[in-house]
Image (cartoon, helix red, strand yellow):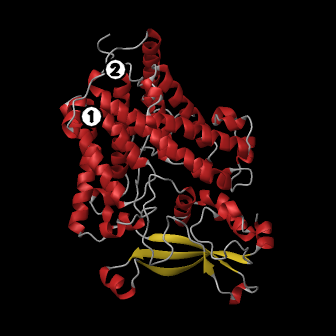
Amino acid sequence: MGWFGAEGYTVGRAVAQHGVAAVYAIAFVVVLRQFRPLLGERGLLPVPRFVERVPWRRSPSLFQWRYSDRLLVGVGWAGLVVALALVVGLPQQGPPWAPMVAFLVLWALYLSVVNVGQVFYGFGWESLLLEAGFLVAFLGSDEVAPPLPVLVLLWWLVLRLELGAGLIKWRGDPAWRDLTALYYHHETQPMPGPASRLFHLLPRPLHRVEVAANHVAQLVVPFFLLVPGTVASTAAGVLVVTQLWLVLSGNFAWLNWLTIVLACAAIDDRAWGVLLGIDVAPASGTGPPWFVVLVLAASALCVVLSWWPARNLVSRRQLMNASFNVWHLVNAYGAFGSITRQRTEVVVEGTLDRDPAQATWREYELHGKPGDVRRLPRQFAPYHLRLDWGMWFLGLGSSAQLGWFVPFLGRLLEADAPTLRLLRVDPFDGAPPRWVRAHLYRYRFARPDERRATGQRWVREDRGLMIDAVDAARLRRVR
Protein backbone atom coordinates (compact mmCIF):
# COMPACT_ATOMS: atom_id res chain seq x y z
CA MET A 1 0.00 0.00 0.00
CA GLY A 2 2.58 2.53 -1.14
CA TRP A 3 -0.16 5.11 -1.75
CA PHE A 4 -1.26 5.06 1.90
CA GLY A 5 1.81 6.67 3.47
CA ALA A 6 2.82 10.25 2.63
CA GLU A 7 6.51 10.07 3.50
CA GLY A 8 7.16 13.65 2.42
CA TYR A 9 4.94 15.26 5.07
CA THR A 10 6.70 14.37 8.32
CA VAL A 11 7.18 17.97 9.48
CA GLY A 12 3.66 18.95 8.43
CA ARG A 13 2.26 16.14 10.57
CA ALA A 14 4.38 17.21 13.55
CA VAL A 15 3.25 20.83 13.26
CA ALA A 16 -0.39 19.74 13.00
CA GLN A 17 -0.25 17.40 15.98
CA HIS A 18 1.76 19.64 18.30
CA GLY A 19 -0.11 22.77 17.22
CA VAL A 20 -3.60 21.32 17.63
CA ALA A 21 -2.59 19.92 21.03
CA ALA A 22 -1.35 23.39 22.08
CA VAL A 23 -4.70 24.92 21.18
CA TYR A 24 -6.47 22.20 23.18
CA ALA A 25 -4.25 23.09 26.14
CA ILE A 26 -5.36 26.73 25.89
CA ALA A 27 -8.99 25.64 25.55
CA PHE A 28 -8.83 23.58 28.73
CA VAL A 29 -7.15 26.44 30.61
CA VAL A 30 -10.16 28.54 29.59
CA VAL A 31 -12.44 25.78 30.90
CA LEU A 32 -10.69 25.78 34.26
CA ARG A 33 -10.69 29.57 34.60
CA GLN A 34 -14.07 30.57 33.14
CA PHE A 35 -16.53 27.67 32.93
CA ARG A 36 -17.74 27.59 36.54
CA PRO A 37 -18.79 31.27 36.89
CA LEU A 38 -20.38 31.16 33.45
CA LEU A 39 -21.96 27.69 33.34
CA GLY A 40 -21.31 25.91 36.62
CA GLU A 41 -23.67 25.04 39.44
CA ARG A 42 -24.05 28.75 40.27
CA GLY A 43 -23.20 29.97 36.81
CA LEU A 44 -25.05 32.46 34.68
CA LEU A 45 -26.45 29.61 32.54
CA PRO A 46 -26.17 26.57 34.83
CA VAL A 47 -25.46 23.28 33.07
CA PRO A 48 -27.81 21.28 35.37
CA ARG A 49 -30.78 23.30 34.08
CA PHE A 50 -29.62 22.82 30.49
CA VAL A 51 -29.35 19.03 30.68
CA GLU A 52 -32.80 18.83 32.29
CA ARG A 53 -34.40 20.14 29.09
CA VAL A 54 -31.96 18.96 26.39
CA PRO A 55 -31.59 15.17 25.95
CA TRP A 56 -28.33 13.33 25.34
CA ARG A 57 -29.16 12.52 21.73
CA ARG A 58 -29.24 16.26 20.93
CA SER A 59 -26.21 17.16 23.01
CA PRO A 60 -24.00 14.18 23.91
CA SER A 61 -21.80 14.99 26.88
CA LEU A 62 -20.35 13.38 29.98
CA PHE A 63 -22.29 16.00 31.90
CA GLN A 64 -25.60 14.56 30.73
CA TRP A 65 -24.87 11.73 33.14
CA ARG A 66 -24.03 14.06 36.02
CA TYR A 67 -22.75 17.58 36.39
CA SER A 68 -20.80 18.99 39.29
CA ASP A 69 -18.18 21.69 39.46
CA ARG A 70 -15.77 19.11 40.85
CA LEU A 71 -16.31 16.85 37.84
CA LEU A 72 -15.84 19.83 35.53
CA VAL A 73 -12.50 20.60 37.16
CA GLY A 74 -11.49 16.97 36.71
CA VAL A 75 -12.35 17.11 33.03
CA GLY A 76 -10.43 20.37 32.65
CA TRP A 77 -7.28 19.08 34.32
CA ALA A 78 -7.43 15.73 32.49
CA GLY A 79 -7.71 17.53 29.16
CA LEU A 80 -4.89 19.92 30.02
CA VAL A 81 -2.51 17.11 31.08
CA VAL A 82 -3.20 15.03 27.96
CA ALA A 83 -2.84 18.09 25.73
CA LEU A 84 0.49 19.04 27.27
CA ALA A 85 1.76 15.48 26.85
CA LEU A 86 0.98 15.78 23.14
CA VAL A 87 2.58 19.23 22.95
CA VAL A 88 5.90 17.82 24.18
CA GLY A 89 5.44 14.78 21.94
CA LEU A 90 5.32 11.89 24.40
CA PRO A 91 2.50 9.86 22.78
CA GLN A 92 3.95 10.51 19.31
CA GLN A 93 7.10 8.59 20.30
CA GLY A 94 5.14 5.42 20.89
CA PRO A 95 3.04 3.16 18.65
CA PRO A 96 0.34 4.65 16.37
CA TRP A 97 -2.43 3.94 18.85
CA ALA A 98 -0.88 6.22 21.53
CA PRO A 99 -1.48 9.63 19.87
CA MET A 100 -4.77 8.28 18.48
CA VAL A 101 -6.10 7.52 21.95
CA ALA A 102 -4.75 10.79 23.37
CA PHE A 103 -6.37 12.99 20.71
CA LEU A 104 -9.66 11.10 20.86
CA VAL A 105 -9.70 11.63 24.63
CA LEU A 106 -9.22 15.37 24.04
CA TRP A 107 -11.98 15.36 21.44
CA ALA A 108 -14.42 13.51 23.73
CA LEU A 109 -13.68 15.68 26.77
CA TYR A 110 -13.94 18.94 24.87
CA LEU A 111 -17.08 17.76 23.05
CA SER A 112 -18.63 17.24 26.48
CA VAL A 113 -17.82 20.85 27.35
CA VAL A 114 -18.95 22.40 24.06
CA ASN A 115 -22.24 20.52 23.93
CA VAL A 116 -23.38 21.98 27.26
CA GLY A 117 -21.68 25.36 26.80
CA GLN A 118 -24.73 27.06 25.23
CA VAL A 119 -24.13 30.62 23.93
CA PHE A 120 -20.76 30.85 25.68
CA TYR A 121 -19.49 28.02 23.44
CA GLY A 122 -21.46 28.88 20.31
CA PHE A 123 -18.43 29.81 18.19
CA GLY A 124 -17.22 28.32 14.94
CA TRP A 125 -13.72 27.74 16.29
CA GLU A 126 -15.09 25.30 18.88
CA SER A 127 -16.29 23.04 16.06
CA LEU A 128 -13.04 23.67 14.19
CA LEU A 129 -10.99 22.51 17.17
CA LEU A 130 -13.14 19.42 17.61
CA GLU A 131 -12.91 18.47 13.92
CA ALA A 132 -9.16 19.13 13.86
CA GLY A 133 -8.60 17.05 17.00
CA PHE A 134 -10.53 14.13 15.55
CA LEU A 135 -8.58 14.20 12.27
CA VAL A 136 -5.07 14.52 13.70
CA ALA A 137 -5.81 11.54 15.94
CA PHE A 138 -5.40 9.39 12.83
CA LEU A 139 -2.08 10.87 11.67
CA GLY A 140 -0.20 8.14 13.51
CA SER A 141 3.03 8.33 15.50
CA ASP A 142 6.65 8.81 14.52
CA GLU A 143 6.85 5.09 13.80
CA VAL A 144 4.79 5.39 10.60
CA ALA A 145 4.48 7.72 7.64
CA PRO A 146 1.60 10.20 7.81
CA PRO A 147 -1.49 8.58 6.25
CA LEU A 148 -2.30 10.33 2.98
CA PRO A 149 -6.13 10.05 3.41
CA VAL A 150 -5.95 11.98 6.68
CA LEU A 151 -3.68 14.65 5.19
CA VAL A 152 -6.12 15.12 2.31
CA LEU A 153 -8.96 15.52 4.82
CA LEU A 154 -6.94 18.20 6.64
CA TRP A 155 -6.40 20.04 3.35
CA TRP A 156 -10.12 19.71 2.67
CA LEU A 157 -10.81 21.15 6.13
CA VAL A 158 -8.68 24.22 5.43
CA LEU A 159 -10.30 24.63 2.01
CA ARG A 160 -13.78 24.55 3.59
CA LEU A 161 -12.70 26.92 6.33
CA GLU A 162 -11.26 29.54 3.97
CA LEU A 163 -13.73 29.11 1.12
CA GLY A 164 -16.67 29.20 3.51
CA ALA A 165 -15.40 32.44 5.01
CA GLY A 166 -14.84 33.95 1.57
CA LEU A 167 -18.22 32.95 0.16
CA ILE A 168 -20.20 34.13 3.17
CA LYS A 169 -18.56 37.54 2.77
CA TRP A 170 -19.17 37.71 -0.97
CA ARG A 171 -22.80 36.62 -0.61
CA GLY A 172 -23.45 38.73 2.46
CA ASP A 173 -22.59 42.33 3.14
CA PRO A 174 -22.17 44.54 0.02
CA ALA A 175 -19.23 46.20 1.79
CA TRP A 176 -17.19 43.11 0.94
CA ARG A 177 -18.12 43.32 -2.74
CA ASP A 178 -17.43 47.05 -3.09
CA LEU A 179 -14.17 46.62 -1.10
CA THR A 180 -15.15 49.03 1.69
CA ALA A 181 -15.52 46.50 4.55
CA LEU A 182 -12.26 47.51 6.23
CA TYR A 183 -13.40 51.10 6.46
CA TYR A 184 -15.31 49.78 9.50
CA HIS A 185 -14.10 46.33 10.52
CA HIS A 186 -10.93 47.15 12.48
CA GLU A 187 -12.93 49.60 14.60
CA THR A 188 -16.07 47.50 15.11
CA GLN A 189 -14.57 44.00 15.45
CA PRO A 190 -15.40 42.16 18.69
CA MET A 191 -12.12 42.69 20.49
CA PRO A 192 -9.58 45.12 19.02
CA GLY A 193 -5.91 44.48 19.65
CA PRO A 194 -3.06 46.90 20.36
CA ALA A 195 -2.49 47.56 16.64
CA SER A 196 -6.15 47.71 15.56
CA ARG A 197 -6.35 51.50 15.69
CA LEU A 198 -3.25 51.77 13.48
CA PHE A 199 -4.83 49.36 10.98
CA HIS A 200 -8.04 51.40 11.04
CA LEU A 201 -6.16 54.62 10.31
CA LEU A 202 -4.43 53.25 7.21
CA PRO A 203 -5.36 55.06 3.97
CA ARG A 204 -8.66 53.94 2.52
CA PRO A 205 -7.15 52.85 -0.82
CA LEU A 206 -4.97 50.43 1.15
CA HIS A 207 -8.08 49.10 2.91
CA ARG A 208 -9.57 48.32 -0.50
CA VAL A 209 -6.38 46.48 -1.47
CA GLU A 210 -6.61 44.49 1.79
CA VAL A 211 -10.17 43.39 1.01
CA ALA A 212 -9.28 42.42 -2.57
CA ALA A 213 -6.30 40.41 -1.30
CA ASN A 214 -8.56 38.74 1.26
CA HIS A 215 -10.93 37.63 -1.51
CA VAL A 216 -8.05 36.10 -3.45
CA ALA A 217 -6.71 34.37 -0.33
CA GLN A 218 -10.10 32.89 0.60
CA LEU A 219 -11.79 32.28 -2.74
CA VAL A 220 -8.89 31.23 -4.98
CA VAL A 221 -5.79 30.14 -3.06
CA PRO A 222 -7.39 27.31 -0.99
CA PHE A 223 -8.06 25.20 -4.09
CA PHE A 224 -4.31 24.91 -4.66
CA LEU A 225 -3.96 23.06 -1.35
CA LEU A 226 -5.23 19.99 -3.21
CA VAL A 227 -2.19 19.97 -5.54
CA PRO A 228 0.52 18.31 -3.40
CA GLY A 229 4.07 19.56 -3.59
CA THR A 230 5.33 23.03 -4.40
CA VAL A 231 1.90 24.33 -5.40
CA ALA A 232 0.21 23.32 -2.13
CA SER A 233 3.20 24.47 -0.08
CA THR A 234 3.07 27.90 -1.70
CA ALA A 235 -0.70 28.15 -1.20
CA ALA A 236 -0.31 27.20 2.46
CA GLY A 237 2.37 29.86 2.84
CA VAL A 238 0.01 32.50 1.46
CA LEU A 239 -2.68 31.43 3.94
CA VAL A 240 -0.23 31.54 6.84
CA VAL A 241 0.81 35.10 5.94
CA THR A 242 -2.80 36.29 5.67
CA GLN A 243 -3.67 34.68 9.01
CA LEU A 244 -0.71 36.38 10.68
CA TRP A 245 -2.03 39.67 9.31
CA LEU A 246 -5.33 38.94 11.07
CA VAL A 247 -3.47 38.05 14.27
CA LEU A 248 -1.83 41.47 14.22
CA SER A 249 -5.06 43.34 13.55
CA GLY A 250 -7.37 41.86 16.19
CA ASN A 251 -8.29 39.19 18.75
CA PHE A 252 -10.18 36.19 17.37
CA ALA A 253 -9.44 33.60 20.07
CA TRP A 254 -7.60 30.64 18.50
CA LEU A 255 -9.25 30.80 15.06
CA ASN A 256 -6.25 32.29 13.25
CA TRP A 257 -3.61 30.26 15.04
CA LEU A 258 -5.45 26.99 14.49
CA THR A 259 -5.89 27.84 10.81
CA ILE A 260 -2.13 28.44 10.57
CA VAL A 261 -1.38 25.09 12.18
CA LEU A 262 -3.74 23.23 9.86
CA ALA A 263 -2.44 25.01 6.76
CA CYS A 264 1.09 23.89 7.67
CA ALA A 265 -0.03 20.29 7.13
CA ALA A 266 -0.05 21.05 3.38
CA ILE A 267 3.63 22.11 3.32
CA ASP A 268 5.86 19.22 2.25
CA ASP A 269 9.21 18.28 3.78
CA ARG A 270 11.19 19.69 0.87
CA ALA A 271 9.70 23.14 1.46
CA TRP A 272 10.26 22.83 5.22
CA GLY A 273 13.87 21.89 4.54
CA VAL A 274 14.36 25.06 2.51
CA LEU A 275 12.56 27.22 5.09
CA LEU A 276 14.38 25.77 8.10
CA GLY A 277 17.69 25.02 6.43
CA ILE A 278 17.68 21.38 7.57
CA ASP A 279 17.53 17.92 6.08
CA VAL A 280 14.24 16.25 7.01
CA ALA A 281 14.35 12.51 7.60
CA PRO A 282 11.07 11.09 6.31
CA ALA A 283 9.09 8.52 8.27
CA SER A 284 8.21 5.32 6.47
CA GLY A 285 5.86 2.38 6.85
CA THR A 286 2.10 2.11 6.87
CA GLY A 287 1.75 0.70 10.35
CA PRO A 288 -0.07 -2.45 11.49
CA PRO A 289 -3.21 -3.61 9.65
CA TRP A 290 -5.54 -2.44 12.42
CA PHE A 291 -4.16 1.09 12.04
CA VAL A 292 -4.77 1.10 8.29
CA VAL A 293 -8.32 -0.18 8.79
CA LEU A 294 -9.13 2.47 11.41
CA VAL A 295 -7.67 5.26 9.29
CA LEU A 296 -9.65 4.18 6.23
CA ALA A 297 -12.85 3.81 8.28
CA ALA A 298 -12.48 7.28 9.83
CA SER A 299 -11.63 8.74 6.42
CA ALA A 300 -14.68 7.10 4.83
CA LEU A 301 -16.88 8.52 7.60
CA CYS A 302 -15.54 12.04 6.98
CA VAL A 303 -16.02 11.67 3.23
CA VAL A 304 -19.66 10.73 3.75
CA LEU A 305 -20.19 13.59 6.20
CA SER A 306 -18.64 16.00 3.69
CA TRP A 307 -21.83 15.97 1.63
CA TRP A 308 -23.60 18.45 3.91
CA PRO A 309 -20.87 21.12 4.15
CA ALA A 310 -20.10 20.75 0.43
CA ARG A 311 -23.76 21.35 -0.39
CA ASN A 312 -23.73 24.31 2.00
CA LEU A 313 -20.81 25.91 0.15
CA VAL A 314 -22.74 26.03 -3.13
CA SER A 315 -26.03 27.07 -1.52
CA ARG A 316 -27.39 30.58 -1.90
CA ARG A 317 -28.57 30.23 1.71
CA GLN A 318 -25.14 29.34 3.00
CA LEU A 319 -24.96 28.68 6.74
CA MET A 320 -22.06 30.14 8.71
CA ASN A 321 -20.38 28.11 11.46
CA ALA A 322 -22.88 25.26 11.42
CA SER A 323 -22.47 21.71 12.68
CA PHE A 324 -24.50 19.13 10.80
CA ASN A 325 -24.15 16.49 13.51
CA VAL A 326 -23.89 16.47 17.30
CA TRP A 327 -20.29 15.21 17.12
CA HIS A 328 -19.05 18.40 15.41
CA LEU A 329 -17.38 16.49 12.60
CA VAL A 330 -17.02 17.98 9.09
CA ASN A 331 -18.66 21.33 9.73
CA ALA A 332 -19.44 24.51 7.81
CA TYR A 333 -17.36 27.57 8.61
CA GLY A 334 -17.35 31.28 7.92
CA ALA A 335 -16.76 34.65 9.55
CA PHE A 336 -18.08 38.19 9.32
CA GLY A 337 -20.69 37.72 6.64
CA SER A 338 -21.88 41.16 7.68
CA ILE A 339 -19.91 44.15 8.91
CA THR A 340 -21.05 46.44 11.72
CA ARG A 341 -20.72 50.10 10.74
CA GLN A 342 -20.77 51.55 14.26
CA ARG A 343 -19.56 50.22 17.58
CA THR A 344 -22.04 50.12 20.46
CA GLU A 345 -20.71 49.04 23.85
CA VAL A 346 -22.74 47.92 26.84
CA VAL A 347 -21.00 49.36 29.90
CA VAL A 348 -22.19 48.09 33.27
CA GLU A 349 -22.11 50.63 36.08
CA GLY A 350 -22.73 50.41 39.81
CA THR A 351 -23.14 52.76 42.75
CA LEU A 352 -23.00 52.59 46.53
CA ASP A 353 -25.43 55.51 46.90
CA ARG A 354 -28.96 55.03 48.21
CA ASP A 355 -30.72 57.17 45.61
CA PRO A 356 -29.93 56.06 42.04
CA ALA A 357 -31.27 59.32 40.62
CA GLN A 358 -28.60 61.32 42.48
CA ALA A 359 -25.90 58.66 42.47
CA THR A 360 -22.27 58.71 41.41
CA TRP A 361 -21.90 55.81 39.00
CA ARG A 362 -18.69 53.85 38.55
CA GLU A 363 -17.88 51.50 35.67
CA TYR A 364 -16.97 47.83 35.66
CA GLU A 365 -14.39 47.03 32.99
CA LEU A 366 -13.78 43.87 30.98
CA HIS A 367 -10.36 42.64 29.90
CA GLY A 368 -10.77 42.74 26.15
CA LYS A 369 -13.53 45.25 25.49
CA PRO A 370 -13.20 49.04 25.19
CA GLY A 371 -13.91 50.81 28.47
CA ASP A 372 -11.42 53.43 29.58
CA VAL A 373 -10.99 55.60 26.48
CA ARG A 374 -7.27 56.04 27.20
CA ARG A 375 -6.40 52.39 27.64
CA LEU A 376 -4.46 50.56 24.91
CA PRO A 377 -6.30 47.37 23.90
CA ARG A 378 -4.35 44.23 24.71
CA GLN A 379 -3.54 41.11 22.75
CA PHE A 380 -5.35 38.13 24.26
CA ALA A 381 -5.69 35.68 21.37
CA PRO A 382 -5.35 32.74 21.25
CA TYR A 383 -6.84 32.92 24.75
CA HIS A 384 -10.63 33.20 24.60
CA LEU A 385 -12.46 35.75 26.78
CA ARG A 386 -15.96 34.32 26.69
CA LEU A 387 -17.75 36.96 28.75
CA ASP A 388 -16.23 39.71 26.63
CA TRP A 389 -17.44 38.07 23.41
CA GLY A 390 -20.91 37.73 24.90
CA MET A 391 -20.93 41.44 25.70
CA TRP A 392 -20.02 42.23 22.08
CA PHE A 393 -23.02 40.27 20.83
CA LEU A 394 -25.16 41.98 23.46
CA GLY A 395 -24.07 45.35 22.09
CA LEU A 396 -25.26 44.22 18.65
CA GLY A 397 -28.73 43.72 20.13
CA SER A 398 -28.59 39.91 20.37
CA SER A 399 -31.58 38.76 22.44
CA ALA A 400 -29.89 35.36 22.93
CA GLN A 401 -27.46 37.04 25.35
CA LEU A 402 -30.17 38.38 27.68
CA GLY A 403 -30.56 34.96 29.28
CA TRP A 404 -27.21 35.33 31.02
CA PHE A 405 -26.95 39.11 31.26
CA VAL A 406 -29.69 39.60 33.87
CA PRO A 407 -28.17 36.91 36.14
CA PHE A 408 -24.80 38.62 35.55
CA LEU A 409 -26.18 41.85 37.00
CA GLY A 410 -27.41 39.84 39.97
CA ARG A 411 -23.93 38.41 40.55
CA LEU A 412 -22.50 41.93 40.55
CA LEU A 413 -25.07 43.01 43.16
CA GLU A 414 -23.93 40.05 45.26
CA ALA A 415 -20.26 40.90 44.65
CA ASP A 416 -19.83 37.24 43.66
CA ALA A 417 -16.08 36.62 43.75
CA PRO A 418 -15.85 34.08 40.85
CA THR A 419 -17.81 36.45 38.60
CA LEU A 420 -15.70 39.45 39.59
CA ARG A 421 -12.56 37.52 38.66
CA LEU A 422 -13.78 37.52 35.06
CA LEU A 423 -13.52 41.32 35.04
CA ARG A 424 -10.54 43.62 34.62
CA VAL A 425 -11.82 46.28 37.03
CA ASP A 426 -14.22 45.97 39.95
CA PRO A 427 -14.69 49.61 41.00
CA PHE A 428 -15.86 48.57 44.48
CA ASP A 429 -12.96 46.25 45.40
CA GLY A 430 -15.20 43.33 46.30
CA ALA A 431 -17.95 45.30 48.06
CA PRO A 432 -21.53 44.84 46.77
CA PRO A 433 -23.06 47.90 45.09
CA ARG A 434 -26.57 49.05 45.98
CA TRP A 435 -27.60 49.54 42.37
CA VAL A 436 -26.35 48.52 38.93
CA ARG A 437 -27.39 49.57 35.45
CA ALA A 438 -26.38 48.98 31.82
CA HIS A 439 -25.32 52.03 29.84
CA LEU A 440 -24.92 52.24 26.06
CA TYR A 441 -22.05 54.13 24.46
CA ARG A 442 -21.03 54.61 20.84
CA TYR A 443 -17.26 54.12 20.50
CA ARG A 444 -14.93 55.04 17.65
CA PHE A 445 -11.17 55.27 17.35
CA ALA A 446 -9.73 58.72 18.01
CA ARG A 447 -8.28 60.50 15.02
CA PRO A 448 -4.57 61.45 15.25
CA ASP A 449 -5.42 65.07 16.12
CA GLU A 450 -7.87 63.95 18.83
CA ARG A 451 -5.28 61.56 20.23
CA ARG A 452 -2.68 64.33 20.43
CA ALA A 453 -5.11 66.77 22.05
CA THR A 454 -6.70 64.47 24.63
CA GLY A 455 -4.48 61.40 24.99
CA GLN A 456 -7.54 59.25 24.22
CA ARG A 457 -7.46 56.22 21.97
CA TRP A 458 -11.25 56.10 21.79
CA VAL A 459 -13.95 58.72 21.52
CA ARG A 460 -17.29 57.74 22.96
CA GLU A 461 -20.80 59.16 22.84
CA ASP A 462 -23.56 58.54 25.37
CA ARG A 463 -26.45 56.60 23.79
CA GLY A 464 -28.63 56.26 26.87
CA LEU A 465 -29.54 53.37 29.12
CA MET A 466 -30.16 49.79 28.08
CA ILE A 467 -31.29 48.77 31.59
CA ASP A 468 -32.10 51.40 34.20
CA ALA A 469 -30.96 51.14 37.79
CA VAL A 470 -31.92 47.89 39.54
CA ASP A 471 -31.19 46.64 43.03
CA ALA A 472 -31.25 43.04 44.25
CA ALA A 473 -34.93 43.10 45.20
CA ARG A 474 -36.05 44.60 41.89
CA LEU A 475 -33.87 42.18 39.94
CA ARG A 476 -35.47 39.20 41.69
CA ARG A 477 -38.90 40.44 40.57
CA VAL A 478 -37.63 40.82 36.98
CA ARG A 479 -36.26 37.30 36.94
Residue 366 picture quarter = bottom right
Q: Are the residues flagged by discs 1 and 2 in contact, CB closer than 8 Å?
A: no
User: Residue at 73% across / 34% down in the picture?
Assistant: 65
Residue 244 at least partly seen: yes
User: Residue at 71% across / 50% down in the picture?
Assistant: 46
Looking at the image, tell me whether mark 1 or mark 2 is earlier in sequence order.
2
How crowded pointer 2 is (Cα within 10 Å; few <14, some 14-19, many 20+) is rated as many
Residue 18 position, x and y percent, is 41, 36
Q: Can you tell which of label 1 and label 2 is closer to the viewer?
A: 2
How crowded pointer 1 is (Cα within 10 Å; few <14, some 14-19, many 20+) is rated as many
Relative to 470, is 398 on the left or the right? left
Residue 221 at least partly seen: no
Relative to 12, is 127 on the left or the right? right
According to the picture, the residue beneath numbered tag 2 turns out to be 145
Look at the image and tell me in which quarter the N terminus lies.
Answer: top left
- Element on which disc 2 rests: loop
Residue 136 vertical position relative to residue 395 in the rendered view, above or below: above
User: Residue at 50% across / 30% down in the picture?
Assistant: 103
Look at the image and tell me in which quarter the C terminus lies.
Answer: bottom right
Name the kind of residue labelled 1 in the image: Ile
User: Which numbered circle lies on residue 435?
Assistant: none
- Element on which disc 1 rests: loop
Residue 261 vertical position relative to residue 343 in the rendered view, above or below: above
Name the kind of residue labelled 2 in the image: Ala
Residue 39 vertical position relative to residue 314 in the rendered view, above or below: below
Q: Nearer the viewer, residue 53 or 351?
A: 351
According to the picture, the residue beneath numbered tag 1 turns out to be 267
Relative to 466, is 16 on the left or the right? left
Residue 430 position, x and y percent, is 69, 71
User: Residue at 50% across / 67% down in the picture?
Assistant: 369
